[in-house]
Amino acid sequence: MDSGVIEGGLNVTLTIRLLMHGKEVGSIIGKKGESVKKMREESGARINISEGNCPERIITLAGPTTAIFKAFSMIIDKLEEDISSSMTNSTATSKPPVTLRIVVPASQCGSLIGKGGCKIKEIRESTGAQVQVAGDMLPNSTERAITIAGTTQSIIECVKQICVVMLESPPKGVTIPYRPKPSGSPVIFAGGQSSSAAISPQLTKLHQLAMQQSPFHIPPSNQGFTGIDASAQTTSHEMTIPNDLIGCIIGRQGAKINEIRQMSGAQIKIANPVDGSNDRLVTITGPPASISLAEYLMNARLSSETTGLAAN
């Protein structure tokens, strides 16, 4: 697929979400915001950066394709510049490639990987970029990170091809966007806008979407393919919940926690109160999709509870 075809096929308004470490974001913002201001003016793209105090931040690029890819190349150039300057006092002989992570709905990853990994292999070969699709969804979301590494040109070409696939295969069901949490903050559903009444009709769809986390039946001959974890192995995840909110998670006679267990398919253990601690430790065990859904359901309960308290 040549660049002209891609440009022609992408004559639309796009939104690309990048996941970056705070240090990288600081470099892109620049002193007094001068760097990002220049990027906005020269590219014509809308560039929004999620709030600070988080180890990770989301940079959202939105606008016509020409503006998006202009902004995108300016971001990559800035990251490459940072790598070069860090090399001046380094003993390393080879320069590491620029590495970026974009965030996409998990429901689109199947189309991006293709049957037996054929689509992602084609993208790797035609662009020269290294591309890796994360097997697990990002916390409290139904999105996955795609890591892309290579030269400026290969990364841009790779993202263009990913955008073509995503435009051809829109997301299915409800997408819960990933929002990085401040380090050490209580786990409350980001945004706080979902009440239990508002999310109930979506839960069946969400459950189906989460259960589609690992339906990509890769033939045995392709078990070595690294783009997706074909076996949804059991893992554990811990979260803390304030003592005064644990009741809304458990429910009367354990009704709510049992409902969350049934819907998510995950095992959930709530630790006994610890003297001197304001929080309770909750351990969720199961396949990554079940953990992600259980965490979402608990955060939605917390959100509706805190929204209700605020309204009173």
Image (cartoon, helix red, strand yellow):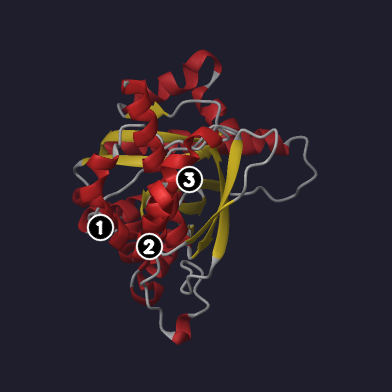
In this rendering, would 169 be left or right of 148? Answer: left
> Mark 1: which secondary structure?
helix
Horizontally, is 95 left or right of 284 in the view? right
Q: Quick one: label 2, few (<14), some, or many (20+) residues within 10 Å?
A: few
- Residue farthest to the bottom? 221
Left-right relation of 49 to 169? right
Identify the image quadrant of the C terminus. Answer: top left
Q: Which residue is mark 1?
A: 204
Compare marks 2 and 3 and give the one earlier in the sequence. Answer: 3
Front residue of 245/178: it is 245
Q: Which mark is residue 59?
A: none
Label 2 sits on residue: 262
* Residue 144 percent coordinates (x, y): 42, 53
Could you tell me how far apart the alpha carbons at marks 3 and 1 are, in whole angstroms?
A: 41 Å
Residues 108 and 42: in front is 108
Return the residue at label 3. 152
Q: Is residue 175 above or below residue 261?
A: above
Q: Amino acid at mark 2?
A: Gln
Residue located farthest toward the top when viewing the structure as drawn:
32
Amino acid found under the numbered disc labelled 1: Thr
In the structure shown, which secondary structural element does the residue marked by tag 3 occupy?
Answer: helix
Q: Residue at x 65, y 37 (%)?
A: 84
